[in-house]
């Protein structure tokens, strides 16, 4: 297996009919302890509204500044559906379209515990090439191979407008 992490400079990400579940430090990252149940509940919520979940799980991580000027990490789990999702109840919300048109991108294939190298590589390229990033990251979990304990994930980091 190659350990190269290739970087592409202008990739787009388009997500439609999205159901989002946001976690924040205040909301309790402890909800991640039962991660599989969290995802199953999202998929059930989609089905109960007459749609079907499609595609892989997507995770968006961003840093927001609160009223006191303190940075807060917010993680959103996103599932796409085959049709618009109506009458969504808390703690979920929907977005009909999420489009990120100019991103640094890489596809990571390897052990999950090494996935931080993909994030680090994109940040290093941005630093070396003076590319301003917005600070949010989308990770699309394409595949998991339990046999050899690897994941395939697409990582998108949107560029900031200059």
Image (cartoon, helix red, strand yellow):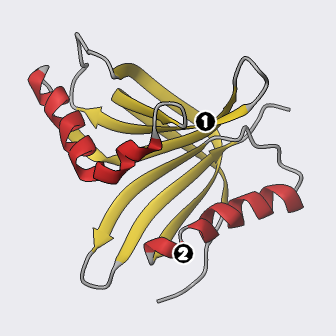
User: SS class of the residue under badge 1?
Assistant: strand
Image quadrant where residue 39 sits: top left
| Number of marks in the rendered image | 2
* Residue 126 vertical placement versus 133 (above, below): below
The residue depicted at 31 percent of the width and 68 percent of the height is 144
* Crowd class of label 2 (few under 14; some 14 to 19; many from 20; radius 10 Å): few
Q: Residue at x 38, y 31 (%)?
A: 21
Of the residues tagged 1 and 2, which is closer to the observer?
A: 2
> Would you say 54 lies left or right of 94 here?
left
Q: Which mark is residue 114?
A: 2
- Residue 156: percent from the left, percent from the top? 58, 49
Gap between marks 1 and 2 measured at Cα: 27 Å
* Mark 1 closeness class: few <14, some 14–19, many ≥20 residues within 10 Å: few
Q: Which mark is residue 31?
A: none
Nearer-N-terminus badge (1/2): 1
Which SS class for mark 2? helix
Residue 53 image position (x, y, % from top left): 20, 37
The answer to whether 50 is drawn above or below residue 125 in the figure is above
> Is 70 situated left or right of 99 in this image?
right
């Amino acid at each position: 297996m190659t350990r190269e992490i290739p970087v592409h400079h202008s990739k787009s990400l388009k997500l439609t009919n999205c159901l989002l579940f946001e976690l924040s430090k205040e909301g309790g990252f402890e909800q991640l302890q039962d991660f599989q149940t969290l995802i199953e509940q999202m998929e059930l919520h989609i089905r109960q509204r007459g749609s079907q979940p499609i595609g892989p799980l997507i995770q968006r991580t961003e840093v927001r500044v609160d009223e006191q000027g303190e940075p807060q990490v917010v993680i959103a789990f996103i599932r796409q559906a085959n049709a618009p999702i109506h009458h969504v109840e808390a703690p979920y919300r929907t977005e009909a379209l999420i489009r990120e048109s100019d991103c640094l991108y890489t596809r990571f294939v390897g052990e999950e515990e090494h996935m931080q190298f993909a994030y680090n590589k994109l940040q290093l390229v941005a630093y070396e090439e003076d590319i301003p990033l917005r600070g949010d990251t989308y990770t699309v979990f394409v595949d998991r191979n339990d046999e050899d304990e690897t994941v395939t994930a697409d990582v998108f980091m949107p560029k900031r407008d200059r």
